[in-house]
Amino acid sequence: MKQYLELLQDILDHGVQKEDRTGTGTISVFGRQLRIDLQKGFPLLTTKKLHTKSIIHELLWFLSGNTNIRYLKEKGVTIWDEWADEEGNLGRVYGAQWRTWLGPNGQVVDQITNVIEQIRKNPDSRRHLVSAWNPAEVDGMALPPCHYAFQFYVANGRLSCLFNMRSIDTFLGLPFNLASYALLTHMMAEQCDLDVGDLIWTGGDVHIYTNHLEQVKLQLSREPFPLPKLVIKRKPESIFDYQFEDFDFEGYQSHPGIKAAIAI
Ligand SMILES: Nc1nc(=O)c2c([nH]1)NC[C@@H]1CN(c3ccc(C(=O)N[C@@H](CCC(=O)O)C(=O)O)cc3)CN21
Ligand SMILES: O=c1ccn([C@H]2C[C@H](O)[C@@H](COP(=O)(O)O)O2)c(=O)[nH]1
């Protein structure tokens, strides 16, 4: 994850001060890309301890199509609490767009099922795309999608994934997002009988909140450990049947966690 640490340094070196919606203040750069070879290990940060439980449950929750935080709360995951209403609803965020995109004539589009079917049947297609950015529904969401679209690509028996983010909380959010899409790529690859290839991240407004600067410097002072290996213990019937217990990050060695306030 040298690339991630280089990105933090890049923002420190080139970022401009920018006010933001949350009133916290950021330093920000515009337009960056990271490329991670998933054959070389699982991209879980080692320069601070990451809460893998939150990452796995959030992804399973997206895949289930659910947009109420009840499931997360039951699992002890609190990362979406601040954005939910009194009933726990977030509006038609990620899960709803991935699984039940609503078409003009009342049709319901399951983008995840469709993309898997297409990867299997027509691997060379250049249309393996899932979009969470639904302009007609953005106003009803607690937070418009930050990771708004992703695309798969098959070559030499390997599945690669490119995901796009419009706005990136580089210290708190991005380590979660990288691990989440890496996990999704491994699951999709297993379901399509492919190996994993590259994970490519593209970012628009890539920022560090000004109240994360000390934490960033601490992280940059640490020496990374070797990356862990993801073990998926079984191959379920479908992408929707994975359970938390199916995943193990073998050999995950990290520096201690670093506390930071989330900008709301
Ligand atoms: N400002 C901001 N940054 C984000 O990354 C973000 C949002 N807002 N809003 C929506 C979701 C929620 N996400 C979050 C929310 C909290 C943590 C966080 O506090 N992480 C702690 C551990 C918390 C835990 O897992 O229980 C960390 O140290 O990584 C991370 C991502 C990602 N997204
Ligand atoms: O998965 C996520 C979700 C959110 N973020 C960050 C990016 C921004 O710091 C905020 C969203 O604020 P906007 O004003 O809507 O851009 O949340 C993230 O990094 N990853």
Image (spheres, rainbow, N blue to C red):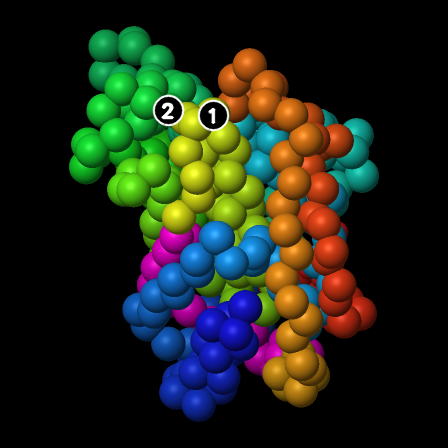
Q: Residue furthest top?
A: 106
Q: Is residue 209 magenta?
A: yes
| Residue matched to label 2 | 116
| Residue 234 in the image, given as x and y percentages of width and height | 65, 25
Instruction: Indicate whether 200 appears above or below 95.
Output: below
Label for residue 191? 1
Q: Which residue is drawn at 47% across and 72% down?
A: 3
Q: In this orientation, does residue 17 appear?
A: no
In space, the residues marked 2 and 1 are separated at their CA atoms by 8 Å
**Left or right of residue 189, residue 69 in this image:** right
Instruction: Indicate whether 256 appears above or below 85.
Output: below
Mark 2 or mark 1: whose residue is earlier in sequence = 2
Q: Which stretch is magenta?
A: 198-216
Q: Which amino acid does label 2 sit on?
A: Ile
Q: How crowded is mark 2: few (under 14 residues within 10 Å), some or many (20 or more)?
A: many
Q: Which residue is drawn at 19% across and 37% down?
A: 126
Q: What residue type is labelled 1?
A: Gln
